[in-house]
Image (cartoon, grey):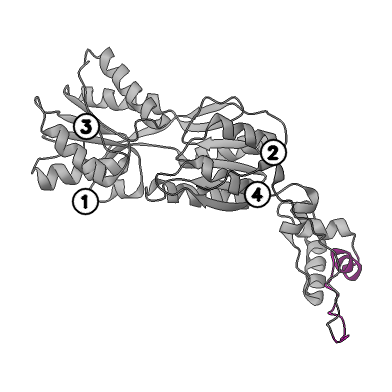
Amino acid sequence: MASAMNFNAMPVFKRSIDSPANSHNENGGAARRKPPTSYDVAKVAGVSQSAVSRAFSQGASISKKTRAAVMEAAGALDYRPNAIARSLIRRRSDIVGLVMADLTNPFYPEVLVKFTEQLQAIGKRVLLFTVPPNHSIDDTLPQVLQYQVGGVVITSATMSSAMAEICQRFNVPVVLFNRSVAVDSVSAVCCDNSSGAKAIVDFFIARGRRRLGFLSGDTDASTNIEREAGFRRRAAEHGIHAIETVAGGFSYEGGYKAALEIMARRPRPDALFAANDVMALGALDALRYQLGLDVPKDVAVIGFDDISAAAWPSYKLTTFRQPIDRMVAETIRVLGEEIEGEDRGGRTIQIAGRLIERGSA
């Protein structure tokens, strides 16, 4: 059994950006050339040291002429700033730790690209950590903290209150993306899952569907809980209280098997809501190729996410689109405010999505 990490004894590495690298060999040989510093660049370029720093900082206020002079001097001196060392000296990092637990779901690689693009646009860098299957995110976060990240974004997973307290002790803000948790110090940004599920029920009802089925994901995931609750509440408002449910674990294989199981029940559902698109695609293949059913004539299928494969001609999946760009931008905004100390955390922000009608419902 691995020993528990001593958070109070986590290593802190200090190294000056401009520290000399001179050294003599054992035979008294000549010292290595001292690496150029930002002060050397400033002297050659005829500018201040702070101007050199601004020249290498994305988004900083500096004229094109001054930046060009700095870059020319840096090239002549073979000067390269050390961002990691600089962050250690300032005791503040421009690195954001991005923790992801399910990269096999096509939704999350797209999310990763969006986060990387938007963070780089504001001068931040992403350090990616993945959580292996059947492992707790609490096992990964201690590794993240060792890199002195400025903040952490967690997708497709939640964290314990104990780990939240540890992050708070180290003054590292944490924002959940597409998940929520009842922890005062942790903020969350999600799609409005409940409203999305209600819109799906209304869509089914408007087309005469009354025998509803739900293919659930991970039953303890906040996204699944909110989508199922919204689905059931709206169905009850339409007078439908009996909803067949089978767990599919958010996977293609799970959706395939769940569709076969739920369609074996009587009375057979005439409409299926899958808690994510990957399960919906599995369900479509099971319905069409294993059971030989006509979709949507015999049974309608709607997913949730709007991954790129949902629009493929072989699927044409009707689904509820999560507004990824807005969700990522809001997550970064919230994290930035907490890094700057403008908010203590604990907010949950829900962003409205919209139903995308294609050919499966």
Distance (Cα) linking label 3 and label 2: 45 Å
- SS class, disc 4: helix
The amino acid type found where label 1 is placed reads: Ser
The amino acid type found where label 4 is placed reads: Gln
Single out the mark in the foreground, 1 or 2. 2
Asked if the residues shown at circle 3 and circle 4 are in contact, with their CB atoms under 8 angstroms apart, the answer is no
Residue 345 is left or right of residue 14, and the answer is left
Q: Which residues are magenta?
A: 27-46
Mark seen at residue 272: 3
Mark seen at residue 314: 1
Mark seen at residue 170: 2
Distance (Cα) linking label 1 and label 2: 49 Å
Distance (Cα) linking label 3 and label 4: 45 Å
Quick one: label 3 or label 1, which is nearer the N terminus?
3
Distance (Cα) linking label 4 and label 1: 46 Å
Residue 300 visible somewhere in the drawing: yes
Asked if the residues shown at circle 3 and circle 1 are in contact, with their CB atoms under 8 angstroms apart, the answer is no
Mark seen at residue 146: 4
Single out the mark in the foreground, 3 or 1. 3
The amino acid type found where label 2 is placed reads: Phe
- SS class, disc 3: strand
Distance (Cα) linking label 2 and label 4: 10 Å
| Residue 98 located within the stretch drawn in magenta | no
- Residue drawn at the location 40% of the way across and 47% of the way down: 133
